[in-house]
Amino acid sequence: MKKPAILVVDDDAALRELITLRLEANGFAVDTADSGEAALAHLALARPDAVLTDMQMNGMDGMALFRAIHARDPSLPVIILTAHGTIPDAVAATQQGLFGYLTKPYDAPTLVDLLKRATRLAGSSAEAGDESWRSEIVTTSPAMNVLLAEARLAARSEAAVLIQGESGTGKELLARAIHRASPRHAKPFVAINCGAIPAELLESELFGHVKGAFTGAGRDHPGLFLSANGGTVFLDEIGDMPPPLQVKLLRVLQEGEVRPVGALEARAVDVRIVSATHRDLDEAIAQGEFREDLYYRLNVVNLVLPSLRERREDIPLLAQHFLARLTEKYQRRIHGFAPDALDMLTAADWPGNIRQLHNVLEQCVALCTTPTIPATLVARALRDKPADIQPLAEARAAFERDYLINLLKLTRGQVSEVARLAGRNRTEVYRLLQRHDLTPALFKDRDDTA
């Protein structure tokens, strides 16, 4: 079994060594850092199960280190060793998420017990290093990593989760990740888009019906809630649920039972609710389109997915990820992107977010005939005109060539006249004509008029 990993941060070498010996004797694996700055560099490379830091250090002190860690990874437990004079600061920090603090001189058994509790909370040993729950979410974005840390903490509880974000940001992927990280992971995950099913059919899909409940009900149908019993129900676009069904959903959440359409008795059901919407539910409540009491039932934990524009550092990574999947799907040998194509992808606005990025890349892969995807295909897929996104040097060269051709037509190939109209000497004009592979003689017999 993997030992729980502790990062010990202290600028006192002797104290670092003493703590290391004690923790290793109690079954911990220990790494050390001699400053807060060094600790952050270490955390960028590897995630321990807990951090133990001194409060007073040269440079970044323990409180500053805690705040930096908590901003990046709120689920990582931090414990501070503090002198009596800084106890108020440590107490205040616990209200901000500090796992705990010990005063100096500390009691070794108390420290060991505190670290054991911290590593159990963080999912120590093999569980802590298991990132398979989030394997479908491709990211290096700090904002996304903070969100995923919060999602993992929420997954371990039974609290209802409301995921908000623009269309195409991956709300269902996050919901599936929460289910995989939850104690219900071995049970069903059932998803339904509340805005994609007609209102008259949605009740039956959610809660089921009995045979003969309505025309066409030739057999019993359990519905999604009963099908997901013991697992997770994902209600996508919950903001589009009709008001009458909102009342029935609220009853399910309050009473833990569903009543299929046409049934005389309700049936007990045990599900965890994860919902999602791109709508502003506060505005929908103000307009009377969404029930406030249901909103509070669904919005126990709120997670807001950033748009792709807000995590541009992920675009090259996502592009390569989708390219690998699409080349396998289409059996194509495409190895990557031309540099200007990748720049264009990174700079695009992406109103459709990750879904739009996937669609753009699928079109590029389907039409590409070269080993790398060129910018022209990306521009076409983005429905931009290539001329609008030409590099300045190319645009200038194209204008220059068209300008010279027009002058040659106007003067019927008379270079001296071209030079006069262009305000340049003949030597310079000849050099420009040579650069653009233009032969004046070809224009002498033309009847074109200006």
Image (tube, rainbow, N blue to C red):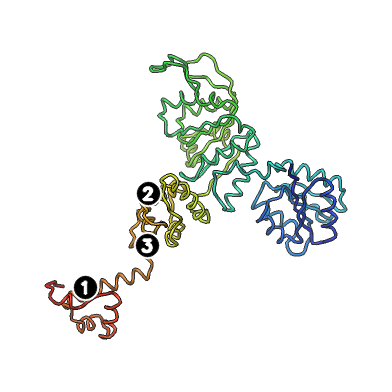
Residue where numbered disc 1 is placed: 406
Alpha carbon separation for disc pair 1 and 3: 24 Å
Q: Nearer the viewer, mark 2 or mark 3?
A: 2
Q: Which of marks 1 and 2 is in front?
A: 2
* Contact flag, marks 1 and 2 (Cβ < 8 Å): no
- Comparing 393 with 103, the one in front is 393
SS at circle 2: helix
Q: For residue 372, which quarter of the picture?
A: bottom left
The three-letter code of the residue at mark 3 reads Ile
Crowding near pointer 1: few (<14 within 10 Å), some, many (20+)?
some
Residue where numbered disc 2 is placed: 366
Q: Residue at x 29, y 83 (%)?
A: 428
Q: Residue at x 55, y 50 (%)?
A: 139
The first of marks 1 and 2 along the sequence is 2
The first of marks 2 and 3 along the sequence is 2
Q: Which mark is residue 238?
A: none
Specify whether 137 is left or right of 91.
left
Q: In this view, does 322 lie above or below 392?
A: above
SS at circle 3: helix
Q: Residue 330: x, y in percent?
A: 41, 46
The three-letter code of the residue at mark 2 reads Ala
Alpha carbon separation for disc pair 2 and 3: 22 Å
Specify whether 359 is left or right of 291.
left
Q: Residue 273: x, y in percent?
A: 57, 32
The three-letter code of the residue at mark 1 reads Asn
Crowding near pointer 3: few (<14 within 10 Å), some, many (20+)?
few
Residue where numbered disc 3 is placed: 389
Q: Residue 78: x, y in percent?
A: 74, 50
Query: Which quadrant holds the N terminus?
Result: top right
Q: In this view, does 249 lie above or below 134?
A: above
